[in-house]
Image (spheres, rainbow, N blue to C red):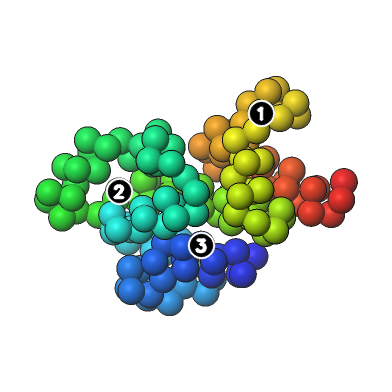
Amino acid sequence: MSAVVEEVARKLGGHSVLGRNVRSQADLALAVRRRLPLVALKGLAQAGLTEQEIERFVIPQRTRRHRADKKQPLTIEESDRAVRLLRIQTVAEDTFGSKEKANTWLRRPLAELNGEMPLDIAQTEAGARVIETILAKIAWGA
């Protein structure tokens, strides 16, 4: 799991954006509590999330512009949502071996999710755990 945490931190911009090295879940939780800077959202886009998805799952565009004007970071809740989505995307990327395959799978309706997309289910922490369990089963060949 620390490899996933370190990859999530790298995607968020690493030390230069987070202001510290992130090597553990505790380090990542602290970064979330301290509120991520808006520039960390670039990592979500680079990971393959669309602007519409970032707006829908993390922070509305209007709010983002307002925060940028006032040079304010994301809230704790927005930071948490950003990290959650990157964590799921990173685990999927690890499972499927490529960013493209991971992002395709995250947007594919799954029968075991009642036809919903994993990305939609991952909006909550409980849902993200479900997606991680499915990805673990895939990784183990179940």
Q: Is residue 113 above or below residue 19?
A: above
The numbered mark, 3 or 1, whose residue comes first in the sequence reads 3
- For the point 47% across and 45% down, the residue is 49
Q: Which residue is mark 2?
A: 75
Regarding residue 38, the answer to whether it shows in the image is: yes
Q: Position of residue 40 (x, y in %)?
A: 35, 58
Q: Position of residue 115 (x, y in %)?
A: 68, 23
**Residue 58 vs residue 106: left or right?**
left
The reply to whether the C-beta atoms of the residues labelled 2 and 1 are less than 8 Å apart is no
Q: Which residue is mark 1?
A: 109
Task: Find the residue positioned furthest to the front.
Answer: 100
Q: Is residue 102 above or below residue 33?
A: above
Q: Position of residue 137 (x, y in %)?
A: 80, 48
The alpha-carbon separation of the residues under discs 2 and 3 comes to 18 Å
The numbered mark, 2 or 1, whose residue comes first in the sequence reads 2
Q: Which residue is mark 3?
A: 8
Task: Find the residue positioned furthest to the left.
Answer: 70
**Residue 26 vs residue 52: left or right?**
right
The alpha-carbon separation of the residues under discs 2 and 1 comes to 30 Å
Callout 2, which amino acid? Thr
- Assign a secondary structure to mark 1: loop
Callout 3, which amino acid? Val
Regarding residue 127, the answer to whether it shows in the image is: no
**Residue 105 vs residue 84: left or right?**
right
Q: Position of residue 131 (x, y in %)?
A: 66, 42
